[in-house]
Image: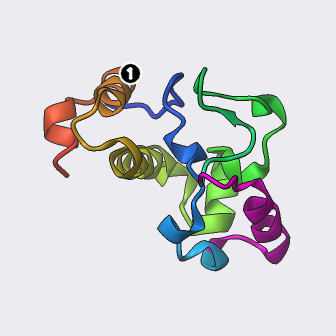
Amino acid sequence: MANWMCIQGCGACCNLDPRDRPDLEDYLTPDDLALYLSLVGEDGWCIHYDTATRQCRIYDDRPSFCRVQPDTFEAMFGIAPEDLNDFAIACCQEQISGVYGEGGSEMASFCTQVGLDSDAESSR
């Protein structure tokens, strides 16, 4: 069974360009939406994401909407805790594919680290 995890050197979720996420208002509170938009840099990446090291500079203090936790995803997306693993994997695959492409090293690394066959899973 595949188990979701955040992998180092990816950062696809730190690409916050609101044009790629037109439904932000559907799952973020007005306060969280304002915070989210304040984090978007001119290049569409989070202002706290270091593109050179591919690491979040505020990882331990990042906002709740940046955390994959049962209570957060249940509140934002209505995802039951028992469904979080599969949902988070699918979200990461979608975001990685959109940012880096389906056949990139980031997707292969993600699939390997969470325990998926990258060829079978990236063609979902």
In the rendering, at what x and y percent does residue 106 appear?
A: 36, 30
Residue occupying image coordinates x 27% and y 33%: 104
In the rendering, at what x and y percent does residue 107 appear?
A: 32, 33
- Residue 2 or 17: which is nearer the viewer? 17
* Residue 71 in view of the camera: no
Residue occupying image coordinates x 60% and y 51%: 43
Q: Which residue position holds label 1? A: 113
Q: Is residue 67 shown in magenta?
A: no
Q: Is residue 35 shown in magenta?
A: yes
Residue occupying image coordinates x 21% and y 41%: 121
Compared with 77, 53 (above or below) is above
Relative to 122, 76 lies left or right:
right
Relative to 12, 51 lies left or right:
right
Label 1 Cα crowd, 10 Å radius (few <14 / some 14-19 / many 20+): some
In the rendering, at what x and y percent does residue 79 appear?
A: 54, 62
* Magenta portion: prevailing SS class: helix
Compared with 48, 98 (above or below) is below
Residue extending farthest to the front is 42
Magenta part of the chain: 27-43
The quarter of the picture where residue 36 lies is bottom right
The quarter of the picture where residue 3 lies is top left
* Residue 53 in view of the camera: yes
In terms of secondary structure, where does tag 1 sit? helix
Q: Which amino acid type is marked by label 1?
A: Gln
In the rendering, at what x and y percent does residue 10 appear?
A: 49, 30
